[in-house]
Amino acid sequence: MQQFLIYNTLSHQKELFTPLTPDHVGMYVCGPTVYGDGHLGHARPAITFDVLFRYLKHLGYKVRYVRNITDVGHLEHDADEGEDKIAKKARLEQLEPMEVAQYYTNRYHDAMDRLNVLRPSIEPHASGHIIEQIEIIQKILDAGYAYVSNGSVYFDVRKYHEATHKYGILSGRVIDEMLSTTRELDGQNEKHETADFALWKKAAPEHIMRWNSPWSVGFPGWHTECTAMGTKYLGETFDIHGGGMDLMFPHHESEIAQQTAITGHGPCKYWMHNNMITINGQKMGKSLGNFITLDEFFTGNHELLNQAYSPMTIRFFILQAHYRSTVDFSNEALVAAEKGYDRLMQAYKTLCSLQPSKSSSVDVKGYRQLCYDAMNDDMNTPIVISHLFDAARVINTVNDRKATLTQNDIDELKSVFQTFVFDVLGLRDEASTDNTALIDGLMQMILDVRAVAKSNKDWATSDKIRDSLAALGVAVKDGKDGATWELK
Ligand code: ZN
């Protein structure tokens, strides 16, 4: 087994990955709030934890990967106030909230499929786990770390922090200061302290998404869902909890507080966070006008884009940076990623057509371990890619007949490419997944066979070909320059 080091955001250091149960890994990653199209900020965590999922499976672990869909409870500004993001979209577009959630869930899946992100083992919806969330809230109330106020339930951050000194343990927020400066809340506010967060919110009359609970007809707070679903599918403690750095506070900090209030410990052994993507050095945001959806990248249909960028270019672009580094989008950076991706795909094609020699003039035995070493060092994908580029250079040198490789060494390189380029980094050859050229070629071959049958006056065969194609929805037209075809 490889010695896999991962950076634990909680301990601020790299730790040797050792799962709680031998050979099994439980992993939870916060998924999207489905009220709009996916953008680069969705692609990065999805791809980062997809590579982790793929690598753990490659190492032989049985992985249960849970990535949720937030379809209720995520209020505007990530705070306890404001309208539910999905309910707001539903109101503006005159749709059922679940229509909005389903539509954007489908769109998210489409975009992730194109990015070759594997589907998680379980993809639970917050709205499908209201009962579990109510149970979690009741347990926190029973433990004495929450209070009911006007039908809503709030987590008592001061009491929790005074008992455990743990609020801020993940994000490094200095909560003592926060608590001492937030006493200004007047009697009108339901919360005792600004730092307190909602576990359950009583629904205002106009709020569409509402459920019965012991406290009021209302809806769960945003942080409650991940505690409920993580516990349900992975247990009270699981191995890895992941997400974007922007979720560390208040979302993940609050998840730790909720779980600790109930069990005395946090939800997981390792916290992992990917860094953010900036656009030309600026934070990405709808209000800043630099918000580019994944579909817009794929089509090039956005004023900031000079061209369309394929899903694999986007994936390669994200993998070219270490997941804990910031990534800055620019057209230049994406064009460079496109070239880098093409270079790897071309190298693999060249590799598959290399002529073996009786002896090798270059040593290629080291590449596999170099790639493992880079992956084992906290998933250092840019270093993996640099080793693969080195291997590509060797392949091109052999192709130019300036070096030689034996069949064994060619097979070893093929296996390294298969493992790291395709299985672990999850890249795929977009050219070969586009079947247009293949279909054109096959159709031409079929029409050639039919032309031969006709010239032999073998009408039974030529009619059978025409009728079989018609049954498949392909119309054949005979003209004076031969037959042509089109889809009906
Ligand atoms: Zn979450």
Image: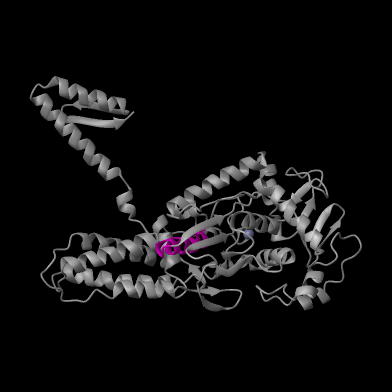
Where residue 482 appears, x then y in whole percent?
Answer: 16, 30
Q: Is residue 226 at all visible to an observer of this figure? A: yes
Q: Position of residue 384 (x, y in %)?
A: 37, 71
Quarter of the rendering occupied by the N terminus: bottom left
Question: Bounds of the magenta span?
Answer: 43-60
Tally the marks.
Answer: 0
Residue found at the far left of this picture: 456
Front position in the image: 183 or 253: 253
Left or right of residue 194, residue 39 in this image: left
Q: Main secondary structure of the magenta part?
A: helix
Whether 171 is drawn above or below 30: the answer is below
Q: Position of residue 475 (x, y in %)?
A: 28, 27
Question: Which corner quadrant of the figure contains ligand 1?
Answer: bottom right
As drawn, 120 above or below 328: above
Colouring of the image:
one colour
The residue drawn where x is 31% and y is 29% is 472
In the displayed structure, 463 sits above or below 80; it is above
| Residue 368 vs residue 35, the one in the foreground | 368
Q: Is residue 443 left or right of residue 77?
A: left
> Observer-nearest residue: 37 or 123?
123
Q: Can the viewer see residue 331 in this picture?
A: no
> Residue sitting at 45 percent across and 65 percent down?
318
Residue 46 at x, y = what percent?
A: 51, 59
Was residue 101 drawn as part of the magenta stretch in this picture?
no
Decide whether residue 48 is among the magenta residues. yes
Residue furthest to the right in view is: 187
Residue 270 lies in what quarter of the image?
bottom right
**Residue at 21% over, 60% down:** 352
Lateral position of residue 98 relative to residue 50, left or right: right
Left or right: 214 as drawn, with respect to 276: right
Quadrant of the snapshot with the C terminus: top left
